[in-house]
Amino acid sequence: MTSKLKFSLLLCFSVLGLSSFAQFTTTVPTNEAVKTGKLENGMTYYIMHNEEPKDRASFYFVQNVGAILENDTQNGLAHFLEHMAFNGLKNFPGKNMLDYLEKNGILFGRDINAYTAQDETVYNLSNIPVASENLLDSALLVLHDWSGGLLLEGNEIESERGVIHEEWRTRRNVRKRLGDQTSHVMYNNSKYADRDVIGSLDVIDHFDHQALRDYYHKWYRPDLQAVVIVGDIDAEKMEAKVKALFSKIPSKKNAAERTYCQVEDSKELGYVAAKDKEQNSLSIMWLFRRDLDAVKTEATERNAMAKGMFNSMLNSRLSELSKKLECSSVGMEFGGFDMARTKGADYIYVAPKRGKELEAFSEILTELERVKRHGFTNSELERTKVQTMRSYESYYANRSKISNDSWAKQLGDLYLKAKSFPSIDWEMAFAAKTIPAITLEEVNAFVSSYSNEANSALILKGPENTTQYYPTKAELLAVAAKVKASNIEAYKDDAGDQPLVAKELNPAKITKQFEIEGIDAKGYVLENGAKVVILPTDYSKDNISMSSFSFGGSSLIADKDLASADMATGIVQMSGVGEFNTTQLQKKLAGKIVRLSANLGELTEGFSGSASPQDFETLMQLLYLNFEAPRFDEAPYNAQMARMRNYVANIGVDNNKALKDTISLAKTNYSPRTLLFGEEFINKIDFNRASEIYKERFSDASDFTFIFVGNIDEEKHLPMIQKYIGHISSTNRKESFVDHKVGPAKGKTSKSFDRKMAVPKTTVTYALQGDFNYTLKNRLMLNVVSQLLSKRYMTTIREEEGGSYGVGVSPSASKLPSPEFSLNIQFDCDPAKRDRLVEIVENEIAKIQKETCDATDLNEIKNNFIKGREEAELQNSFWLRVLKNNQMLGSEFTSKEDYKKLVEGIDAAAVKKFAKKLFKKVDTVEVIMNPAE
């Protein structure tokens, strides 16, 4: 046994008062709607009725077992087991489980998934249709088999080695490599630093089959497992089924103790400077460890609420500071997280501008010291309290729309971490009594979270080059000492009290009404020519969503001004509107549930946003001001430009950017209208021209269509629309977009290039593009082809070849500026397997045109389409998209019944015929990024 492993094990067994799972508890009452209990074999269950989405249920299997329980020879086996749970179960040998579920429209990767962490492994089957009793029973049987029925057959283990090897390759990115260098300091040399979940490549490639089976039989057992079921079910009936099925699982005799590895407090400040050649900038984090409560009480809940207020107010001050040109950082944040089951951390994070490392560190520490000496102001706290309470009110109003998966994950945390799971009524009552009672002194006291320097660590991550300066521990501590000795003034809270819109406005007249066939939406034309479409729904009680568009976009902008156009909406976003700069605006909007953002695309410009029904007028005021009184302030603009220039200084080391840029150029045949972010792009941005472009594109209401979907009270909200949208200036211009004919070169374009990499990896992108008849049926057929290819690549490239962790197949179709489709295929792989895998990609595209597709695969895809449509119709976002496509593209609405008929009418012969026509004349772009020798 190595000395390192001995040390890790000593830490595991040295936990005082936390060696037993039963000691993680909560005194907060659990929601009475949850049926919960523990079977004689030790298995826990939680069952809850919920109707979001309607007629669906989610099944979670939660295991209090993760990578932390591995020894060095097992490093990676917990995660390997997670993969094996989809490769053969007692009652579902081979791929029978996936095949059966996918036949019922339950899709692997979307509805069927799992994750492994250091302390837990969680599996889920989501959105299971509840109409079929057999399907519900089968879902239970899958969970039952996950408990103790994994077959772990030798041939399946061998085939999965390659998959996980490639997952290891894909995940060994720069972030992961930097994390590996810093984890020993962050976790104070505990076992957590050695267990990164995916594990050791040597173990993955060479472990003996019995080692995996031994780990499985040791740790997969009912006393460490919980069944969580949430959905549109009879909870009492489901409880009886759970008891009957899972009680049959025998308890483990002489079971190993599930211990909890402790992250010990350090006796002195830790320091590490991690470097990587593919990292382009420096960050400094000062991390302060803290213990987590083993027993979660009301005091725990109040403490979390007050601490959230502390972080919110401090980060608001940092946001204000960041808008100043003299600010020495490109990013700053205070926050916290759970770093292990028994240990949490609070952190100070700063990303300095190049050459301003010590200044940036001083700035963020100065803001912390400002709070330590002077505290927050009453006005800051009151705004934050209002915002916090408003969040609870919105949460309560939307309680019927909380998804099964959201509840299931929270119940999983109740089991694993004893995080409280009270009723929403309890939460509201708790918030109502607690928020007003939180004092300024209580919030200010959290500054002490950053006082224990001995139990902290300075963690630096940055580029490995000769120009980046890394402050030493002594230099950073000297900055801290200097800040503590400096003269720091109290913060002045500048919040304007004037109304958002001071001008008196009366509702404009409606000059015309219109209907949309097949949808209960109403259309109006206002005096200024603005078109408005309204669809009231009750899918979300506290939400009204909005989208708007006007044709033109950047297609009307000259090549030389495209960079300025790209910055146009950002200038307003960072400047504010009317009498309010962005800082003042954020304060003005405290307590409002409202969001609005402008977008300037290639063919259109517009706004998207949402609001609570009670804050709808605020949304309309913001929309009005973004048209009529946008601000163009040079100070925040110059600060942003400085951050951008700092970012591009070392951008050449970013392999992902090199790949994306190469793909963009190849797909547009090196068009001068292709924007690539970099120094040249920044140099082309002109503040005045960007401001002019914004005014040009957002200046004529008659050119815009505004669409609203949600909990709309037409009698109340339509007059607000008339009042504000009806008074946006109008010039009655008639514009459209310009088709610049940007696209790939005819035929096949191949581009291969090499990049220096720490972990050798080839990335292949294979894209096809061609003309397309933009109909719903054809779009469905395109998606069928895409999913069939995805299934084939899963079998051939991932499973048979062990060549890639996964092959992404992404289809898209557009009607404007001209009807066309694209199909993008991308994957990472071992450079030695590149040519073989590209050959498979091309062979499968050829096969789908020549051979009739597998009927079972096709039926799975069709069932998934039908199931997905049923679920989508219960979301505001679906109807917003339908109405926008109707108004922008003239797309007709297809009812759920007609959609189902259309899908059911797709057969294998039709797919073959469609694929042959689709790929008959396409332009292909192949981009391959290889590791340099």
Image (cartoon, helix red, strand yellow):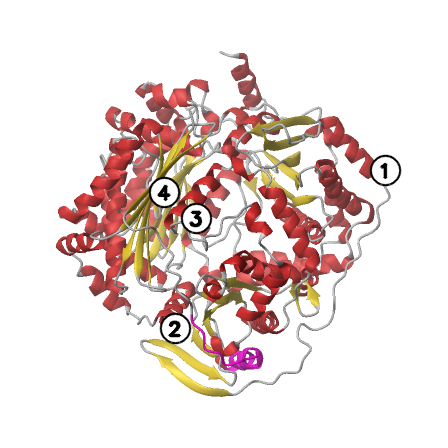
Between disc 3 and disc 1, the foreground one is 1
Name the residue beneath numbered marker 1: 485
Name the residue beneath numbered marker 2: 887
Tell which circle, 3 or 4, labels the residue nearer the N-terminal end.
Answer: 4
Marks 2 and 4, how far apart in space? 37 Å
Q: Secondary structure at mark 3?
A: helix
Q: Residue at x 53, y 37 (%)?
A: 652
Above or below 486: residue 770: below
Tell which circle, 4 or 1, labels the residue nearer the N-terminal end.
Answer: 4
Q: Magenta segment range? A: 715-736
Marks 1 and 2, how far apart in space? 63 Å
Name the residue beneath numbered marker 4: 113
- Residues under numbered marks 2 and 4 in contact, where contact means CB atoms less than 8 Å apart: no
Tell which circle, 1 or 2, labels the residue nearer the N-terminal end.
Answer: 1
Place of residue 697 in the rendered image (x, y in percent of width and height, measured from the top left): 53, 69
Above or below 372: residue 605: below
Between disc 2 and disc 4, the foreground one is 2
Residue 597: name its quadrant: bottom right
Tell which circle, 2 or 4, labels the residue nearer the N-terminal end.
Answer: 4
In this view of the protein, can residue 533 be seen by the observer?
Answer: yes
